[in-house]
Image (tube, grey):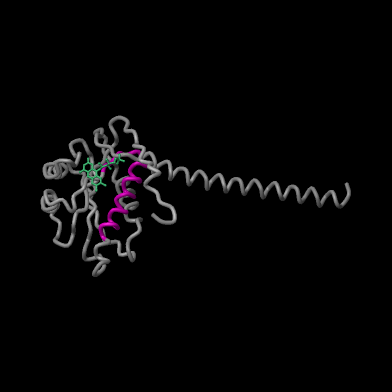
Amino acid sequence: MKKIDYVLITLGLAALVLAASCSQANRKADAGDSAVIENIMTRTSVRQFTSRPIAKDTLEMIVRAGMAAPSAMNKQPWAFVVVTEKEMLDSLCAVHPYSNLKTATAAIVVCGDLEKAGKDFVREYWIQDCSAATENILLAAHALGLGAVWCGVYPNPNVLPQVTRVLGLPSWVIPLNIITMGYPAGESQPKDKWKPENVHYQRW
Ligand SMILES: Cc1cc2nc3c(=O)[nH]c(=O)nc-3n(C[C@H](O)[C@H](O)[C@H](O)COP(=O)(O)O)c2cc1C
């Protein structure tokens, strides 16, 4: 074999190895992206649950996902009350008629902690910050095979004081919502909400 043939074969092999490693990296990126998109697109509110309890580690993982959310100036002005005791779930259910807590095995109450929030207008970002944490929690629950639903508390004057009282929250802690959760009883179909008319490009 001529020297030039060796060079060509070596170059060809190197190209093959490079192409294989690139395509593996691309496949990983595709799979990662599509798993996230798939999770977002298949999440839906679940309101009926089986009696299977949720492991403590699973609940902690879900709260970790909540705390991974972005927040204005990274203030992280949140606190999470994890409720698993039946008596407490029943007490919350009694004060929030739409909380779907009858069959839920757990609830995470996402609260704004105004002592951690910024000043002036930045303070009001606690609502967006806690909403971002809430969506992370809903998606994490879904990814872990759980069902969940966001039940609004703040600013509903008919439930806000009652939820505050039941949980014994201090005056600077405001419950944004109760996320009720559990293992889903039955299948729930995600809603198709895609409306191209709601999108504007460049300007209105
Ligand atoms: C701010 C807010 C408050 C909500 N409050 C309640 C509630 O009190 N009870 C309830 O069953 N669902 C509640 N939901 C869930 C919505 O009804 C649900 O997200 C909506 O119907 C869309 O359905 P999907 O979550 O399956 O996509 C609330 C959602 C949001 C964002």
113 shown above or below 44: below
Q: Is residue 172 magenta?
A: no
For the view shown, which residue lies furthest in the right direction?
Answer: 2
* Left or right: where 3 falls relative to 151: right
For the view shown, which residue lies furthest in the front direction?
Answer: 204
Q: What is the quadrant of the C terminus in the image?
A: bottom left
* Left or right: where 16 falls relative to 157: right
Q: Nearer the viewer, residue 128 or 76?
A: 128
Q: Position of residue 107 (x, y in %)?
A: 23, 45
| Rendered residue at 22%/45% (across/down) | 151
**Magenta span main SS:** helix
Question: How many marks on residues?
Answer: 0
Q: Position of residue 174 (x, y in %)?
A: 18, 57
Q: Nearer the viewer, residue 53 or 68?
A: 68
| Rendered residue at 29%/46% (across/down) | 59
**Taking the image as four quarters, which one is ligand 1 found in?**
top left
Q: Nearer the viewer, residue 113 or 60?
A: 113
Q: Which residues are magenta?
A: 126-149
Q: Position of residue 24 (x, y in %)?
A: 59, 46
Q: Position of residue 79 (x, y in %)?
A: 24, 57
| Rendered residue at 34%/33% (across/down) | 189
| Rendered residue at 24%/54% (across/down) | 80
The image quadrant of residue 100 is: top left
For the view shown, which residue lies furthest in the bottom direction?
Answer: 119
* Left or right: where 13 falls relative to 128: right
Q: Is residue 139 magenta?
A: yes
The image quadrant of residue 41 is: top left
